[in-house]
Image (cartoon, rainbow, N blue to C red):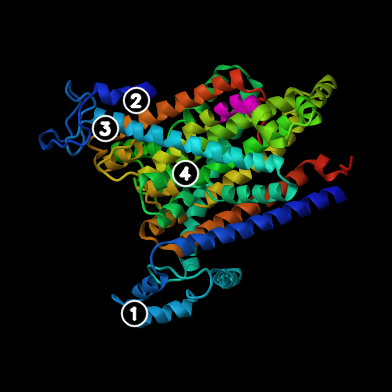
């Protein structure tokens, strides 16, 4: 799926926003394998380009939240107790509000754009990472080799960077992969209710939204993007599970 | 006992800190929005192009010329007394607007939770007892698939099948039983997937414990084991996830209510976000935070009630 989205737009060189009124809602054919939409735009090209927005957007959110979660998680684990308490309560505050509601509020404050949608998703998604990293780092710090490093006088930042982080790398990959799928779901859901890319740029969520007006006549326009989201998330979740079996040294560390 | 009490007071305090932070967040959300509240409120009361003096007057009246901290203090004071401000759009108190929409969301949350628990718990138990049976594998498969499908999409597919093609149920949600069935099913599906797996895992965990072996050795029947010995422990570990699930449902499920045009509080939040009606969003955030904190407290109390180990003196 990832390959299709990366390579696809080069192989399938059809303009995803070129309108062709004569081809409105055309059924699937050789020149348009997925048919065309209400403006005669080629559906396959729209799916492929739309997938880029969905996947790269979600990837960016995962990267951003990983960094934010790592920094805050290490502050919690290494900092003084009051800082841990304060940051933990802030984390809980953001957890208390459903992500979609918070993203709605943020999108009402910021102007409506894709980058602000990504920002909103990062701001609502980091809590889970921060808690995981806090738990992981605390667990790692309790290891005997850390005590050894402390005994020979290695400073805390060096312990974190040189000793703890390399050991956490596997878990970090697992955490990000497991979360990737749910970020795609949230991203497409928000984009579906109209808080994302503006038309005519395609994205899987807003493709489904656009198809709503026609979905009794042409359910295909709604079903295909949904299947794309579902298969991508399914593969990511399975990949996450497989990676966990191979990489995660602490199976079952949950906050 | 003192240890538990101490722990509980600590949790109570943490909850209050979280509530206070939620209130700051809600205030910031209301305050940072673009647009002039004074102008919007005047337009809501019927003036199309309010004169500059009137706007300045209103700004003074609302205290918008005062420093941020003193604005927060007076806002918080009003909130504590139950005054959550008025909508920029309709000029009505937002609390009244919220209360009008709340019953619809409550009904649907109740129905969704009933559906999900009445399917998930038996399914999880059977999967645990008949491990690696066909049903267990089917449930596992469905749980994996269920976690990957977007809820709003499955909602559209269900509308297509049951409303457009079969014409059994209405496509638009309403606070009647027929109008609630589809949204409630869509809301219940991911919870069924999650909860049934959780029930399965905890049941397996409990059934492997020593005291079950002892009870079995004493000749207790398998059903007696399951319902008399295992189930209470399974129930205790389900309290927290279920109360959080209920909290999530009660805050109004924004996306699904939008798909079905269901007249609940989630849809109200979307409408407010689209037109920049910030007091409504602020109230939604406050209430979500409140429900979350209260649900956590209830879960703690419920755990203590169900698990005698937590009530005993654990000072060791």
Residue B228 screen position, x and y as percent = 76, 32
Would you say the residues marked 2 and 3 are in contact, meaning their CB atoms lie under 8 Å apart?
Answer: no
Give the crowd class for mark 4: few <14, some 14-19, many >=20 residues within 10 Å: many
Image mark for residue A46: 3
Where are the magenta residues, as a range? A165-175
Circle nearer the viewer, 2 or 3: 2
Residue A127 screen position, x and y as percent = 58, 43
Element class at badge 3: helix
Tell me which corner region of the image, top left, top right, bottom left or bottom right, holds residue A31.
Answer: top left
Task: Measure the C-alpha gap from mark 1 to mark 4.
Answer: 38 Å
Would you say the residues marked 1 and 2 are in contact, meaning their CB atoms lie under 8 Å apart?
Answer: no
From what the image shows, is residue B47 above or below residue A190? below
Circle nearer the viewer, 2 or 4: 2
Q: Nearer the viewer, residue A68 or A243?
A: A68
Task: Measure the C-alpha gap from mark 1 to mark 2.
Answer: 54 Å
Image mark for residue A6: 2
Horizontal relation, residue B33 to residue A174: left or right: left
- Chain letter of mark 4 equals A
The residue depicted at 39 percent of the width and 31 percent of the height is: A229
Give the crowd class for mark 1: few <14, some 14-19, many >=20 residues within 10 Å: few
Dots 2 and 4 on the same chain: yes
Residue B6 screen position, x and y as percent = 82, 52
Horizontal relation, residue A49 to residue B98: left or right: left
Dots 4 and 3 on the same chain: yes
- Can you identify the residue that label 4 sits on? A121
Element class at badge 2: helix
The residue depicted at 85 percent of the width and 22 percent of the height is: B218
Q: Tell me, yes or no, whether the highlighted magenta stretch contains residue A14.
A: no
- Can you identify the residue that label 1 sits on? B52
Element class at badge 1: helix
The residue depicted at 85 percent of the width and 48 percent of the height is: B3
- Chain letter of mark 1 equals B
């Amino acid at each position: 799926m990832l390959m299709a989205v990366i390579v696809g737009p080069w192989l399938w060189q059809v303009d995803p926003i070129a309108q062709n009124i004569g081809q409105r809602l055309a059924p699937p054919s050789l020149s348009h394998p997925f048919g065309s939409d209400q403006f005669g735009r080629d559906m396959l090209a729209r799916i492929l380009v739309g997938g880029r927005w969905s996947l790269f957007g979600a990837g960016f959110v995962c990267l951003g939240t990983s960094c934010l979660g790592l920094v805050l998680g290490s502050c919690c684990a290494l900092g003084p107790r009051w800082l841990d308490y304060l940051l933990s309560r802030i984390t809980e505050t953001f957890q208390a509000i459903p992500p979609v509601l918070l993203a709605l509020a943020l999108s009402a404050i910021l102007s409506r754009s894709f980058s602000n949608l990504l920002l909103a998703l990062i701001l609502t998604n980091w809590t889970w990472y921060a808690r995981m990293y806090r738990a992981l780092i605390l667990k790692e710090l309790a290891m005997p080799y850390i005590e050894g490093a402390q005994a020979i006088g290695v400073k805390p930042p060096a312990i974190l960077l040189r000793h703890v982080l390399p050991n956490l790398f596997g878990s970090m990959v697992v955490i990000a992969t497991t979360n990737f799928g749910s970020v795609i779901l949230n991203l497409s859901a928000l984009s579906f209710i109209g808080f994302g890319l503006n038309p005519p740029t395609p994205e899987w969520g807003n493709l489904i939204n656009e198809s709503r007006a026609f979905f009794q006549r042409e359910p295909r326009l709604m079903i295909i993007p949904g299947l794309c989201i579902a298969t991508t998330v399914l593969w990511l979740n399975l990949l996450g599970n497989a990676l966990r079996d191979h990489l995660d040294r602490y199976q079952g560390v949950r906050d | 006992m003192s240890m538990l009490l101490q722990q509980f007071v600590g949790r109570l305090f943490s909850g209050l800190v979280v509530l206070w932070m939620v209130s700051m967040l809600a205030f910031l959300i209301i305050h940072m929005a673009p647009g002039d509240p004074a102008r919007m409120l005047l337009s809501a009361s019927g003036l199309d192009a309010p004169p500059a003096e009137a706007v300045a007057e209103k700004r003074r009246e609302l205290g918008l010329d005062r420093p941020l901290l003193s604005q927060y203090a007076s806002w918080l004071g009003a909130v504590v007394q139950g005054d959550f401000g008025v909508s920029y759009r309709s000029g009505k108190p937002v609390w009244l607007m919220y209360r009008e929409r709340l019953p619809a969301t409550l009904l649907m949350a109740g129905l969704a939770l009933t559906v999900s628990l009445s399917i998930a718990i038996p399914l999880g138990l059977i999967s645990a007892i008949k491990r690696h049976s066909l049903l267990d594998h089917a449930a596992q498969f469905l749980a994996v698939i269920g976690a990957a499908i977007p809820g709003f999409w499955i909602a559209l597919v269900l509308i297509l099948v049951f409303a457009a093609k079969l014409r059994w149920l209405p496509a638009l949600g309403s606070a009647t039983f027929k109008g609630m069935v589809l949204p409630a099913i869509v809301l219940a599906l991911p919870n069924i997937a999650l909860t049934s797996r959780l029930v399965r895992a905890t049941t397996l965990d409990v059934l492997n414990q020593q005291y079950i072996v002892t009870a079995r050795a004493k000749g207790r029947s398998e059903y007696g084991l399951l319902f008399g010995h295992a189930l209470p422990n399974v129930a205790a570990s389900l309290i927290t996830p279920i109360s959080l699930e209920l909290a999530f449902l009660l805050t109004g499920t924004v996306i699904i209510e939008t798909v079905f045009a269901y007249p609940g509080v989630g849809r109200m939040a979307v409408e407010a976000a689209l037109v920049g009606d910030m007091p409504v969003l602020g109230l939604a955030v406050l209430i979500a935070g409140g429900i979350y904190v209260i649900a956590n407290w209830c879960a703690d109390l419920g755990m203590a009630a169900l698990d005698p180990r937590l009530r005993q003196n654990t000072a060791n």
